[in-house]
Amino acid sequence: MVVTSSIMSLEDYFNYEDDTDTRYELEDGELLMMLPESDLNLRIASFLLVYFAQQEIPSYRLRIGTEIVVTGTRATVRLPDLIILTEELATALKSSSRSTVTMDMPPPHLVVEVVSPGKKNRDRDYRYKRSQYQARGISQYWIIDPIEQQVTILNLVDGLYEEAIFKGNDKITSPILSAFNVTSQLTVTKVLQQEF
């Protein structure tokens, strides 16, 4: 839901305060109120956070609630469900007063979005965020889709995302996780059912 009728700059967005706990994204200069996540979406994001931590990905490199400034027609800030930071980005965020990955910071290693029901949400995750994360240079983007019962992994290769779709008991393979020496048997079913 669009909150303001005027176009906001990044500075306007960073200074916006409504004295509530409402979460927002900025999409092409429009302030969008983020409706509360479904319980399933929160469970999936939390499951992956715990899973990644159990795989010994350092906790200071895992984030829920960190924003990412991306390119758009106008100012755009996304709020992914989960992020794995690079070492350089973790260092850059240490000195930041806000948990926001700005354009002058390195991109994250991996961004995860859990798709919410509805055409707008699907378009946002599959189309708009895909092109924005690709342009931002994010190495890997996971789209977890409980409706389609699949996980789409997009790997950045020579500036473009290459897509791999996993379903059911397919083992999820990821160069990012391999770089962390993660060798477990994570499957789509385990992610969607939050089972270790």
Image: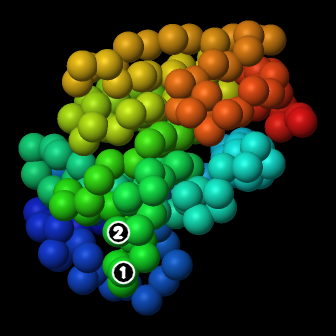
Give the residue number, with chain letter if any, for mark 2.
Answer: 92
Label 2 residue SS: helix
Quarter occupied by the C terminus: top right
Q: Residue, x 36% and y 80% (percent of image)?
A: 95
Viewer can see residue 174:
yes
Mark 2 surroundings within 10 Å by alpha-carbon count, few (fewer than 14), some (14 through 19), many (20 or more)? some
Q: Residue, x 71% and y 33% (percent of image)?
A: 182
Q: Amino acid at mark 2?
A: Ala
Q: CA distance from mark 2 to mark 1?
A: 6 Å
Vertical relation: 188 (above or below) 36: above
Label 1 residue SS: loop
Q: Which mark is residue 159?
A: none
User: Is the residue under label 1 in contact with that under label 2 (CB below 8 Å)?
Assistant: yes
Q: Is residue 194 left or right of residue 37?
A: right
Give the residue number, with chain letter if any, for mark 1.
Answer: 95
Q: Residue, x 59% and y 57% (percent of image)?
A: 62
Residue 80 in the image: x percent, y percent?
A: 47, 50
- 181 or 191, which is in the foreground? 181
Q: Amino acid at mark 1?
A: Ser
Quarter occupied by the N terminus: bottom left
Residue 171 in the image: x percent, y percent?
A: 73, 15
Q: Residue, x 23% and y 24% (percent of image)?
A: 159
- 185 or 69, which is in the foreground? 185
Viewer can see residue 1:
no
Vertical relation: 113 (above or below) 17: above
